[in-house]
Structures are given as C-alpha cells and as structure tokens.
Image (spheres, helix red, strand yellow):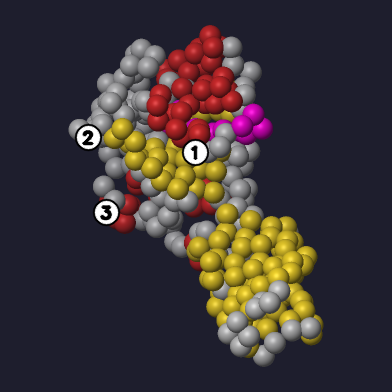
C-alpha cells in the first residue's frame, strides 16, 4: 500500500504546493476557505456531528466546523509540523476541546465515529480509501470531497464553483462532491397488504450497488419492476405499478435491522389511501459494491 505524505507549509493559510514524488503521494495544497464553507454546507453540518478530515493540513476544515457549527472532530496528517500548527490554531481559536489533530496514517485511522468525512486527496487515494468508508461508516453518514470523486460510486450531489484564490489549477475552479453512506438493502423482502380488497403477499428481490437499487416485486399472481427507486442512507422509496388495473403502490420507509418500516400509498383510479408498511427481510445479501475487489496498483495508475 502506498504511503501518503503531506508536505508542510511554514505559515498558517499560506502554502506552496509541491509535486507528488511517488505513486499515491498527496501533496499538501490548502483548501480555500470558500470551498471549506461550501463543503460543510453540502454536508448539512450541525452541532451533533462528528467530523473526520483526511489530510487535514493546517486544520482549517475541522476548526471551522467546530467554531461555526459547534461540531466536534479531528483531522489526521502525516506531517508533524502541520499537525502541530493545526493544534496551535485550534487552541488560539478556542476550539481545542472540540477539534484535535493527529500525526497518523489515514489507512490506520478509525473512521467509525464520523458522521461526516471530509477529504481532499488525489483520485487514486480516494479509490483506495473508498472500501473502508463504505464498510466502516454508519448508514446516513456523509462524505464530502474536494476536486476528486470516488470513481464508479456516483455522488448524490456535485457542484463546480469559482475559486479565485485557489493555489493550483489554471481555471481557478473547484469541484465538490457529496455522498450519503447507503444502508444494505440487498436481498429479499416480504410484506402483506390489501390489493383490490384482498390480502396479498408482496415479495421483492433488491439488487444494490452503492446507493443504486433495482428489483422486481411479485404480488397477486403478477410481477412488476420497481420504479423511481431511491436509497439515501437508511431511507428507501420506490413505486410499483399494477398494469392490470392501472393502480400504483408508492412505498417509503426506513431500514431498521431486518425490517423496513414506513408507509404504503395506494393510488387507484378513483381513490387514494395510505397504510402502514412493514417489510421483513427474508434473505440477506451483500450489495454488489461490497464484492468489488480492491483496486490494484496497476488499476490505480490508470486514474493518474
């Protein structure tokens, strides 16, 4: 596994970027404050959040999260001078009780406490850390990156913003990407509901890759693909259309252990009604992204 080195700047909020020396190295480049603010806004940060910043540099992201939003958290970096600088700044700013910084390898860092992860690393490093984010963070946790995405894991939201003071790049623009860690919805589920006045059993087989889900529902002697499917953290919703009578079933709920608890809205030709909905998991499977092999050095080199 490549070692990530972060190169120091001598002054707070003033850095000179240096080129990476070996594969997987991440040079230290400051995130402009306008991007810091936008990243925290996209994360919908609040005082209950715990932020972990990978490659924290001078600490401005976690310090801003603590000072402006009242959040807690820490940053990790391999450059001791930057770690010392960040801790001194946190103390001077009055947030040392909520913002700490450690000289630590990001691959050896425990992410499990984070409700928000912030990242400004090279694209190949993002790909290397992606499996750990998905395996470790709780569903509903948020991930925000600066400039580089997560490969085939498509973001839930992304923007491009003008950044006149950006220290690298000719176009002076930054990209910000946002994801919500999805729950595991893959597998088979079953529930019962009234269809045309009769109790029917619904069976669905959900296929999942990251937050993308698809599947087919079998009920009352027929089957139909789910439509408008959405998985955001533990929140799931989809629609099933019954072509025989043109009725539509709209499901929305939250995954809780081996159940989905929520509401089912029945939309028929002349009536609508809303019922409580509880589905039981009958078969657990791993989502497709959990079965992806970790990227090899050769594959990661293609990203560069």
> Which quarter of the picture shows residue 79?
top left
Disc with the residue nearer the chain's start (1 vs 2): 1
Position of 22 with respect to 260 (left or right) is: left
Position of 47 with respect to 142 (left or right) is: right
Circle count: 3
As drawn, 105 above or below 10: below
- In the picture, the disc for residue 172 is none
Q: Which residues are magenta?
A: 46-56
Does the image show residue 202? yes
Disc with the residue nearer the chain's start (3 vs 1): 1
Image coords of residue 179 (percent x, y): 49, 48
- In the picture, the disc for residue 42 is 1
Residue with the mark numbered 2: 171
As drawn, 237 above or below 107: below
Number of the front mark, 2 or 3: 2
Residue with the mark numbered 3: 302
Number of the front mark, 3 or 1: 1
Q: CA distance from mark 3 to mark 1?
A: 29 Å
Residue toward you, 264 or 142: 264
Q: Residue at x 53, y 9 (%)?
A: 92
Q: CA distance from mark 1 to mark 2?
A: 22 Å
Image coords of residue 84 (percent x, y): 47, 16
Image coords of residue 60 (percent x, y): 46, 22
> Which quarter of the picture shows residue 34?
top left
Q: Which structural element holds mark 2? A: loop
Q: Residues within 10 Å of mark 2 (few under 14, many from 20)?
A: few
Q: Which structural element holds mark 3? A: loop
Q: Residue at x 36, y 12 (%)?
A: 11
Magenta segment: does it hold 234? no
Disc with the residue nearer the chain's start (2 vs 3): 2
Image coords of residue 134 (percent x, y): 54, 52
């Amino acid at each position: 596994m490549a070692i990530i080195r972060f190169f120091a700047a001598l002054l707070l909020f003033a850095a000179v970027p240096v080129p990476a020396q070996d594969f997987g190295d991440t040079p230290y480049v400051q995130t402009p404050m306008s991007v810091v603010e936008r990243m925290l806004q996209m994360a919908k940060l609040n005082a209950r959040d715990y932020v972990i910043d990978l490659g924290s540099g001078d600490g401005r992201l976690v310090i801003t999260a603590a000072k402006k939003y009242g959040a807690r958290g820490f940053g990790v970096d391999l450059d001791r001078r930057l770690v010392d600088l960040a801790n001194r700044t946190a103390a001077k700013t009055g947030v040392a009780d909520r913002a700490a910084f450690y000289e630590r390898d990001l691959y050896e860092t425990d992410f499990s406490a984070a409700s928000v992860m912030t990242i400004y690393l090279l694209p190949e490093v993002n790909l290397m850390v992606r499996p750990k984010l998905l395996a470790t963070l709780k569903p509903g946790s948020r991930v925000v990156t600066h400039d580089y995405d997560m490969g085939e894991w498509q973001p839930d939201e992304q923007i491009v913003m003008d950044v006149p003071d950006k220290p690298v790049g000719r176009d002076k623009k930054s990209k910000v990407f946002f994801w919500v860690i999805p729950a595991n919805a893959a597998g088979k589920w079953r529930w019962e509901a009234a269809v045309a006045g009769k109790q029917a059993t619904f069976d669905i087989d959900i296929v999942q890759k990251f937050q993308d889900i698809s599947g087919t529902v079998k009920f009352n002697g027929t089957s139909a693909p789910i439509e408008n499917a959405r998985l955001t953290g533990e929140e799931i919703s989809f629609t099933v259309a019954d072509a025989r009578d043109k009725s539509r079933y709209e499901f929305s709920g939250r995954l809780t252990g081996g159940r989905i608890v929520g509401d089912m809205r029945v939309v028929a030709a002349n009536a609508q009604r809303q019922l409580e909905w509880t589905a039981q998991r009958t078969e657990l499977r791993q989502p497709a992204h959990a079965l992806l092999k970790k990227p090899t050095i050769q594959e990661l080199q293609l990203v560069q």
